[in-house]
Image (cartoon, rainbow, N blue to C red):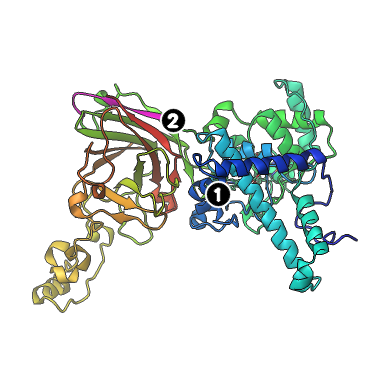
Amino acid sequence: MRRGEKHQINVPVRATASLTVVSMIISLSLMGCQRASAASPPSGKELYALHCAACHGQNGDSKGIAAAFLFPKPRDFRAGRFRLVSTSNNVPTREDLHAVLLRGMPGSSMPPWEHLGQAERDALVDEVLLMRKEGARESFVAYLREEEELTEEEIAEEEVQADIDDYVQRFTTPGESRSVPVIESPDTESIARGRDVYFKQSCHSCHGKEGRGDGVEKMVDGEGFPTSPRDFTLGIFKGGHDGASLFRRVAYGMPGTPMPGSSALKPEEVVDLVHFIRSLSSEDMRLAAIMKRAKIFVRAVNAIPEPFDSNAWSEIAQVNLKIMPLWWRNDADPNLQIQAIHDGKSIAIRITWKDGSEDKHATRSESFEDAVAMELVRGNAEPFLGMGSVDQSVDVWFWDADRQTSIDVEDQYPNIVADIYPFSENLVATAEYHRKGTLRDEQPSISLPALAAKNQIVPGRSISGGSDLGVGGPGSVTFRIPKSQLVTAMGQWKEGRWTVVMQRALSVDTPDEGVSLGPGEKASVAFAIWNGSHQDRDGQKLITIWQDLELEK
Ligand code: HEC
Ligand code: HEC
């Protein structure tokens, strides 16, 4: 037996080291070298560190700083259980990986990278493949050390090194692909046949009789994380909703998940299944699940209207953005509407979204409030989408629902009893005899240290409802100092929707006050919302990808 035959990471051994693929890999890696030596475009390594590492980990092991906030979890490139494959041995082709980068993975926080150039995406694919190779090498060497008890000297021998290279090559070279037939528009017969195959193949045992993903209760993926069969009525498809992509998902399954492949089915049967599955959702729903980059044009106006003057705002064009939960939930509305104007001095951004409940009181430790934030940067190279990085900080404008309301703790806790504060005779008396001891106004500042220290998030301190934050990477959110709090914001909840208007002077004096804007200029912006009744807070939120903001001259 060849060394390594026993050690299969997760893919069936099928050595299909076709010469063309090998030479393709070699020529591509040569291209990679040329790219790195030509100084101008960033290398795959740099692009990866900038855009991907915070989620996928510096070395591709899926343990990035942001990964704790994400569900499903980012892919571990070293382990190589790629889900979206089109080959018999589950090894993705370059095209498979490229398609993921273009589309992202709807139904997860994996964003699309359509806005990067083809050359940049190519360099990123190289980088992912390189990490997969390193991972394969690493795990095989560990196997030789632990299972075959080879010493370091033995491992260094030429023959063993050749075995290792051979192993890496076999487990990272894509196998054969089934050709995908041309998929015509569906007809009722094909959908009906597809339905029959769906039951015959027991798809319903997981995906449910009506395709609602409710056939089984609990499942885990290859990494031991919970997963669930797709609810086809939502139109969310991680690997693309077009016929050819769905054909591949059904034919090859999704390695590393319970979703099986159907290699025994005839191509016509797979096409029928695809038609049946697509018949359960509409094209609009399928498109709504895909993150897109849009241009937000900031119209120049004579005067900025009042935040809730709907007549005046109805004149301003609305941009519809897609927003996704980082911790996935199927019931989140994917839409966020933006309008933006400036009057040459100030800019106003009006954000509206669906939210069935107004959550504005966060006085109880178990309740959370609704909120919205806008991340803003200028310059060609956008930093990491999730809060920038240490080298490239972002400006954040923030509004949350409890900031603009004054909260009486007594309203929330009618039976509250104050402790005896030793600081004030007077207070003790009121607390003891009238149960009013907790009223803020009646307490000496020494018993309210946060207020005394001018902590800006103490309820009632900020009259504007808005906050300016400076952020340099996940986990580094900092309120700007009081004199740099320049954003004002107002929110209104009406008939199941929030409308929030954030406003600020276009230009600011120093970078400490945020990002300066001017007529005719461009910036990149991204948005986040928190839904209090879903207990959203901090990194548990819904986000858009970067969008283009352009101010009319
Ligand atoms: C906000 C976090 C995040 C960022 C940033 C991110 N990813 Fe992902 N990525 C994910 C998640 C989560 C998954 C797994 C989704 C799933 O399994 O449903 C994933 C999956 C993938 C996959 C696996 C596809 C498959 O077939 O299984 C590839 C390849 C990938 N990402 C590449 C990249 C690259 C390259 C970048 C940077 C340009 C990047 N990702 C940036 C979160 C992220
Ligand atoms: C053992 C349970 C199970 C069976 C049986 C099963 N699936 Fe799945 N299927 C899953 C799971 C789990 C997922 C989601 C995997 C993920 O998102 O990581 C899934 C996902 C899918 C997807 C979504 C692909 C995408 O791009 O997001 C399609 C389509 C699908 N299944 C079709 C089928 C068809 C057709 C059959 C029958 C031939 C079938 N499944 C049988 C568990 C199953």
Instruction: Return the residue nearer the eye: 248 or 41.
Output: 41
Instruction: Return the residue nearer the eye: 232 or 487.
Output: 487
SS type, badge 2: loop
SS type, badge 1: helix
Q: Quadrant of the C terminus?
A: top left
**Which residues, given as a range, are shown in magenta?**
294-305
Q: Which residue in the structure is indicated by mark 2?
A: 294
Whether 3 is drawn above or below 153: the answer is: above
For this view, does 272 lie left or right of residue 543?
Answer: right
Q: Nearer the viewer, mark 1 or mark 2?
A: 1
Q: What residue is drawn where x is 30% and y is 51%?
A: 469
Q: What residue is drawn where x is 63% and y is 38%?
A: 98
Q: Which residue in the structure is indicated by mark 1?
A: 45
Q: Position of residue 259 (x, y in %)?
A: 72, 46
Q: Position of residue 135 (x, y in %)?
A: 68, 57
Q: Position of residue 315 (x, y in %)?
A: 29, 21
Q: Quadrant of the N terminus?
A: bottom right
Q: Ligand 1: does it lie within 8 Å of the C-beta at label 1? A: no
